[in-house]
Image: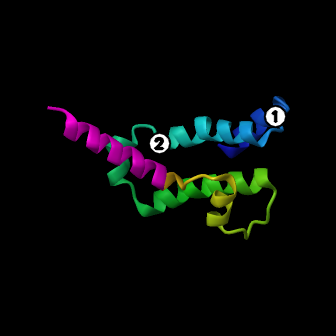
Amino acid sequence: MNYVLEKICNVGRIKSWALKKYLFLTLVTLVFLYVVEEWGNNISLCTWKEFENVQKHFLIKFLQVKQQTPYVLLLLEIGSLPIEIMAMERVVEYMLKVKRVP
């Protein structure tokens, strides 16, 4: 997916980090989180790590930092959360919403 996003940015001559971050969120992250409320509790830790590797490689590529840069520092730099945490937020919000239904 990162290669597709990179191609979109190159074809569109997109240089803005804010726009690249937005595109990653809408084109990649939201695909990973699609109906996470239904399947999120059944996904393995290994699969979450694969999702986060996509996010890490995107950040390394577009921030132009070394491969060894810790994932946590990359997230801090851009003010983002790991995909797994975003998923947990959605699941908890969904559970609270269901609990409020009479």
Q: Label 2: which residue?
A: 33
Indicate which disc, 1 or 2, sits on the residue closer to the N terminus: 1
Q: Give x and y (percent) for residue 97.
A: 27, 37
Q: Residues within 10 Å of mark 2 (few under 14, many from 20)?
A: some
Q: Give x and y (percent) for residue 10.
A: 83, 36
Q: Residues within 10 Å of mark 1 (few under 14, many from 20)?
A: some
Q: Dominant secondary structure of the magenta stretch?
A: helix
Q: Residue at x 73, y 36 (%)?
A: 19
Describe residue 46's horizontal placement relative to residue 62 as left or right. left
Describe residue 91's horizontal placement relative to residue 79 as left or right. left
Q: Magenta span covers which residues?
A: 85-102
Q: Nearer the viewer, residue 30 or 16?
A: 16
Q: Residue at x 65, y 41 (%)?
A: 24
Q: Nearer the viewer, residue 101 or 87?
A: 101
Q: Residue at x 75, y 66 (%)?
A: 67
Image quarter of residue 71: bottom right
Q: Reply yes or no: does residue 55 show up in magenta.
A: no
